Amino acid sequence: MKDIDKLQKRNRKLRDLTERAGSTGLAITGLIGLLFLGVLVWQIAEPTFIKGEQGEITPASESIPESDYRFKWDFPTVDENGEPFTDPVVLRFGWDDENGSHSHDVEINVIETRQVKTDIYIDSTGVDQTEIDVGRKTNFNAYSSLTVPVSVEQISGPVPNADETGYPAVNTFVITGDVHVLWDDENKQVFQPMELLGWITLLILVVVLTWPNVAVLNIIQKLKGRRTLIKLASYVLAGTTFAISDGMFVAAALGSICWLVSGVILYKIAEGIERLESLGRELSETSRLKHSISARDGVLMWSRMLLFTSTLFIPLLIDIPFLTERYQDIFIPYASGIRAAFYGTIWVMLIAMLVSIPVSVGAAIYLEEYAKPNRTTKLIQALVTNLAGVPSIVFGMFGLAIFVKQDGFGWGLGPSVLAAGLTMGVMAMPIIVLAGQEALRSVPRTLRESAYGIGCTRWQVTKDHVLPSAMPGIMTGTILAMSRIMGEAAPLVVVGATAMILFDPEPLAALNGGNVNFTVIPIQIYFWTAEPDHAWHSMAAAASIALICLLVAMNSIAIVLRQHFRKRLKS
Amino acid sequence: MSETIGGEVVPDSTRQLDVDGEVDLMIEDLDLWYGDKQALYGVSLPIAKNSVTSLIGPSGCGKSTLLRMMNRMNDLIPICHYDGKITMGETEITAKDADLVEIRKRIGMVFQRPNPFPKSIYDNVGYGVKLHTKPTREELDAIIEKSLRRAAIWDEVSDRMHDLGTSLSGGQQQRLCIARTIAVEPDIILMDEPCSALDPIATAAIEELILELKKDFTVVIVTHSMSQAARVSDYTGFMYIGRLVEFGETDKIFSDPELELTKRYITGRFG
Amino acid sequence: MSFLNRISKDKAGTILFLTSLSVILITLGIIQTLLFETITFFSDIAEHRGWFSLEWDFGGIFSASGFACLLLVVALILDYESKKEKNRLSIIPQEVWNPHHGIVKAVFILVVLQLLFNDSFLLGLSILFLTMIWRATGKLQMKRIFGGNIEISNTWRNVLFLFIFITLFDAITMNYSGAFGEFFLQNQWTPTGACEDRRSLCDTMSFGVNSLLLTTLQVAFGALIIAVPLGVGCAIYLSEYAHPRLVAIVKPTLEILAGIPSVVYGFFAFIYIGPLVVQFGEYAFANGWIDESPNVLNPINGAIVVGVMILPLIASMSEDALRAVPNELREGSLALGATKIETTMKVMIQASLSGIVASIILALSRAVGETMAVTLAVGTVAVYTSNMFLPAQTMTAYIAQRVGGDLPFGEIGYLTIFAVGLYLFVITLCLNLLGNKVLSTYREAY
């Protein structure tokens, strides 16, 4: 009998139970991250490409529980002969409340030119529009804030179009919920389900091709004798894509590039398989295959990168005018675009890069290679580490006082692209310095020692040996820092970015006395979100998706770069 | 039956092996793979009760893998799978539904690098005991003192029980780990190169301790030092490329090995 | 690269040193701007209302703060006694210093709970301090009896002195005014008033930054309540349990989550979380749990969205800390017959604690400094209420909202944002310094 067996035992069943409960609980918390991302993406994406719930169709006589309603009509603009309608539509709104019966007529003229979007508001004081003109987009809304049912009767004019459920919209109202469908001028949906499906398929294809596994390799193996065929097929598909693209040049070009690059990757993998087979290796050793293809071929790395980014950009290009052609339309949300914000972002990023990269890479090199471990170095190091954690809005205030204002210590650049770029550059600096230091630290000491061993000076060692090895790390860090500041809105709110810009921002306006106003995508999202009308929220969602796509593209470039160079350094 | 690998003649290791006295742990025909790479080929080995069995062999021959198999530590490596049978009395260790907690309580392990927990010395030794039982404070104190005495470290730490275990020197840390293991009173103690990270004086102390522990426990030790195997063990197994090439009493293996391969390894001509 | 070759060794060093000096310049610039404008702000107010004034109220010694002060003094005496080699504490039975660990846990849970429900924050805090001193003293006493290295540090003593001063001050003074008294100790934040001259101050203006600060803390700690269990749980799951293939999916997902701009999170809060919170608030209102009906913009909304934002930060930093723990510790515990959850809870978390704590502190700093999401989620009403369903305003949101209009240089509104900004900067700087210090101790450990 051992001593330990004499003691009171712990309950084994209880221990097993805690084990099971603990692991399950942890698994649930672990997957909540994914859940949040799912909800986030869905909530942002939903208003842009899902045609909101149709809602129930309720007869006007039934009691209305909620206090806020939206009525929606869709009138045809031309009759069956193709002639435009000339008589106005007259709608009569009627309701009964404690003050008696009310009725209001509203006359609606359908006109050919694009027109200010007008809504009808019904509240206890009456109807706020008696006569309105609606433009080509004859689809308009009426809102009610009454607690009693409102009946709607059409007195004259053409019969409204039936909606999808087959009900005509007169004398009934449709609770449309939040219907946000993003339309462009031709009433074409921005993200069409089929296109989205196609894009997702393409993305899956990209992922499968970029990270080969045994199952895929076995399929590719069957093609190995016909490598030229793969090449030809990719040419043909690329040509076809371009030919049937119908004028959408950029999208077509990107699509063709996708096909070509897929061809190149397939070709290379097939080549790698043949090489492996001639060496008598098993296909299951995928790591060897990757090594045999990618370590020696920069082509594959660049193709992957190109393929990945092109694929990510395709959904944006389905509605390219939103990104690069349209300005914000003051009155019609759905006709707006983010052209000004897009170019503003590019200019701000360029200036920030020009300012921050040379200085911060220099500082990183100094701190890692040159600085003696004395008090100054420690101070600088502590400042860098803590600057990276300073709230972004504080950088914005720094920019406001130094770059924007003229009084005091200010440079007086005004709320311009230049001031914003400088502010963002200052903000990116500590992040790049830290990333650069990390990269320089990971260069093995033996490399430096061997270089010193053959009589290099310190600068020669740094320039010829350390920097080239650390470059991928520095580049990755820089791209990540840039993608972080690209999404920042707080400093620019302080610097003074404005939302309503109807022209391209000029980068040097602050110096040559032009119009300094500018905007960037995050700012545009911020102001659109703060708008009361739900329609602007759809635009904010679309801009969010555009921004996230840009960021993911930048990050994936950084990731691919990092993986490629890490592999190269190892081999 | 034998096969030739890399110019060396390696006998098939599925042979019936015998030890004197009671067998504590029996390994029968064990194959083990990491992914699709086979690491053990049909190893059979009996471990005698209250003796020290040492496993020697060149690096990468699978001796640590075999040791870690004995209390199923290999289960922590996701790509590892195996075939074969290890039994300890009535218990089948390799069974799918085996109770790993009970197995590891009965078969303790000491690792290559000393790994005291970041807790006080007292808590380090008490940790295992408190996992399995609910001792009163007096009982726990008694067990801890007894374990530390048996691990020959009591005199050095009795006045600093509430200091961090990591504040001790390397050799002391390793003895603390041994004390931690014997506190739960296992039947078998597995030691995976316990002295490889220690200086000669600490090594001598641990070797002395192993000889002392033999009275109460069965010890299996993996070592890369042949002189250590010769000094401490009763039985020695020589492994080569995943096979148990030769097994027998230590004196016999070191003075008159059966196989040319073993002789060449022991005399230091390869490995 | 030919021009680079022409730079001699010394010149290269000098140029590089100059580049790194720019970092010092920027920091000085930030501090200088903030300080300069803040000093102007305070002196502007001081011209009208004086620098600082208060009224004594010695009867307040019998209030909650007075009691808190008494508790802290007791704690201080305990601390002094326990540091002496031969102390009078041995009169008290050993069980008081070293009770069963279950009792210790229960006491700590009770103390944390009372902190949440205590009306007087200072009293709650002082009870927490007393408990912690009790444990520290207990550990010292144990070491005196059973032996061990006794390290004496005076950190606690300094903290106690500081808090005794604060509680005493709070107990015996009232009605603070003047520039500093108003800014740091009053609760009313109305920086705009109907004055004839825009630049000058008038009586309707009031600058008690606490109403902004308290909302900021509400949001930040609310975010921690959401993000810490989820984030640390996620980290433990990823490093201890998850299949490598799952890690390969979840880790990049967390990185994507961390890379999404805060304004997008703000949009998310505005259109999705806000309405959900309102639904819950309506329910609470209908049941009489809260006094006023909820608003779509509120601190809970902000806390949730900031929690989601800092979750990936906590998860990935804690996971790094857990991964840095040598595998031998994990194996050592399992080899003793511990189950996986026992190993995780009793060994792994203890070994990586400083890394996890550092991640939480840095996440708190991020939550305090977060701007766009809270601006869109919390609202623009600069009134602190304990009812978290009503709109409020955080410090960052105030800055972002205030600069939205036209702000002439030197106007009082322009100066307020710098005063608030400096306060924010100091808070986050302290948190970052603390976090980085904890982080470096854990880097030294492994």
Image (cartoon, rainbow, N blue to C red):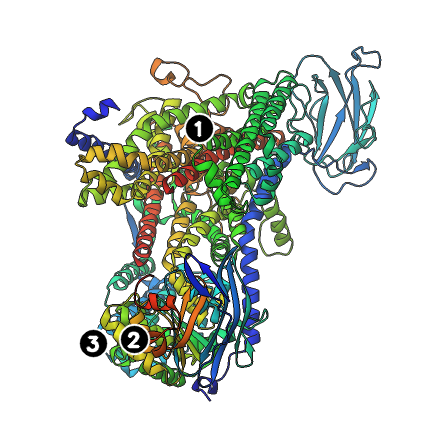
Which amino acid type is marked by label 3? Glu
The residue under label 2 is B206
Q: Is residue B248 left or right of residue A216?
A: left
Callout 2: 10 Å neighbours few (<14), some, many (20+)?
many
Query: How far apart are the two marked residues, 3 and 1, measured between alpha carbons?
Result: 64 Å
Disc 1 secondary structure class: loop
Please report, as a chain letter, where disc 1 is located: C
- Along the line of sight, which residue is nearer the eye, B56 or C12? B56
Front tag of 3 and 1: 3
| Residue C5 percent location from the top left of the image | 21, 26
Mark 3 vs 1: CB contact within 8 A: no
Front tag of 2 and 3: 2
Query: How far apart are the two marked residues, 1 and 2, measured between alpha carbons?
Result: 76 Å
User: Disc number at residue C92?
Assistant: none
Q: Is residue C93 visible?
A: no
Q: Are marks 1 and 2 on the same chain?
A: no
Q: Is residue C77 above or below residue C170?
A: below
